[in-house]
Amino acid sequence: MANEFTATLEKVLSRELIGFKSLKSCEQLTAGASQETYRVSVEIYSAESDSSENPCVEQQLALRRSQPSIESDSSVGSISLATEARLFQLAGAAGIPGPGICYVLQVDDGLGSGFIMDWLHGETLGQRIVRSEELTAVRPRLARECGQILGRIHALDWKTAGLSGELPEVDPAALVEETWAYYRDFNVPVPMIDYTWRWLRCNLPNASRSALVHGDFRNGNLMVTTHGINAVLDWELAHIGDPVRDLGWLCVNSWRFGISTLPVGGFGEIDDLLAGYRETSGLDVSREELEFWQVFGSFWWAMATLQMASAWRSGDTPSLERPVIGRRSSEAQMDCVNLLIPGAFVLPALDEPISQGTQLPMPAELLTGVAEFLKQEVAEKLDQHNGFLARVAANSLGIAQREFQCGNELASGEQQRLQNLLGQTGELNDLRWELVNRLRSDMPLDTPGLADHLRQSVAGQLAIDQPRYSALQQPQT
């Protein structure tokens, strides 16, 4: 409590909170990709009694701020935290559930960019929302409720609220090109991203309306109680654009947390989502519109995860989590595969003993031992934040272990398929670039062998990066 950060925070709270007595604790929770969230506990003099008698109550708040190592408080496509705070206020005034904003940090406060808000109680972890026994009764109602809330969000009068100059405005075609341009500038060959970009360009919505779009409305950014949705969180990707993007993003497989049979957040059906949306917006959304934005959502996430890894590699955002997040790109790519070119694929035999080989112990065995120690011993003895980081470290070692185990075999198969597809020989990386360059020019998307090659390559990479991801649960040969 004696460090500079908490001392500065206490100074701000004492000035801005009515009845403030003391800062009891400030706990950093699991950090997001670009933002940090803290649970702040304070003592407040009770308004019902004479403060001279020293009757106090404990109050919890949430502090959201940019990671201090990031020069800007925005990431890919995001807005400032000050604008995000204003969106919380605008939404709250319209009856959209969410926390009240207590204070927006100023430059002179010395805490960086961010804001302090009410602490609300409810479940925010997507894995628990789709599986918790406590939420069993409410889950079937959540898809319709999501649709109703989105209808109200898309009706918000952002112009009157003075947000015209603070929110990016982008149409679907520009959004597709902007997303692809981010990926292109990483200078890495990922053929499935280029394939999906081509498909999106050929299947743009014929017409779309313009509205305030939340931009990250999904399971994981919703707070749920036994009564329903208690809060819509994380407005940092809000923009002006096609509102169907929000509905499609909610249905992306990444946010179903393993319950792929329920396409809306892993808890509901699309018919219920669209019915709820129709109730509050008066608009019908077609399955074709929804599918476009589902594909775009996985395409965008495939790029965004690479962006985080690229920022880590450059040294701009040192983080244990970001390089592991970068490996999640294959998850989103596999979702694009299953939406656009579904079919059979063959996975490496990861269940074989990893001790095969003449070296004792094998490199993969060393990594496995350390990973198990981090997960089963270290993580359990640390606080929530550092325990999370220990598990991230274990996951990173697991990826490296599987790379040792089957990476050479997968690379050899990919190289042979590329040589057959392209009609030329070469090193694997050169062949990947050749395919990417052809996809960026005029290679037909129905070229014989192309879909099979992409499906097999992405599935193989995902088996290394995250073999338990639900997109791999497809018919295989």
Image (cartoon, rainbow, N blue to C red):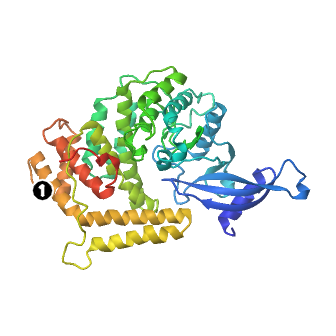
Q: Looking at the image, which is closer to me, 351 or 460?
A: 351
The location of residue 281, given as percent across then percent down, is 52, 23
| Residue visible at 46% across and 71% down in the picture | 377
* On-image quarter of the N terminus: bottom right
Whether residue 296 sits left or right of residue 11 in the image: it is left
Q: Which residue is mark 1?
A: 426
Residue 402 occupies quadrant: bottom left
Mark 1: give few (<14), some (14-19) or many (20+) Cα within 10 Å: few
Q: Is residue 452 above or below residue 108?
A: above
Whether residue 235 sits left or right of residue 412 in the image: it is right
Could you tell me which secondary element the residue under label 1 belongs to? Answer: loop
Q: Can I make out residue 142 in this image?
A: yes
Give, as a three-letter code, the residue at label 1.
Gly
Q: Is residue 183 above or below residue 409?
A: above
Q: Can I make out residue 243 in this image?
A: no
The location of residue 193, given as percent across then percent down, is 29, 44
Q: Is residue 418 above or below residue 317?
A: above
Q: Looking at the image, which is closer to me, 377 or 172?
A: 377
| Residue visible at 32% across and 50% down in the picture | 330
The location of residue 251, given as percent across then percent down, is 41, 37
| Residue visible at 37% across and 55% down in the picture | 326
Q: Residue furthest top?
A: 282
Whether residue 239 sits left or right of residue 206 in the image: it is right
The location of residue 83, given as percent across then percent down, is 59, 41
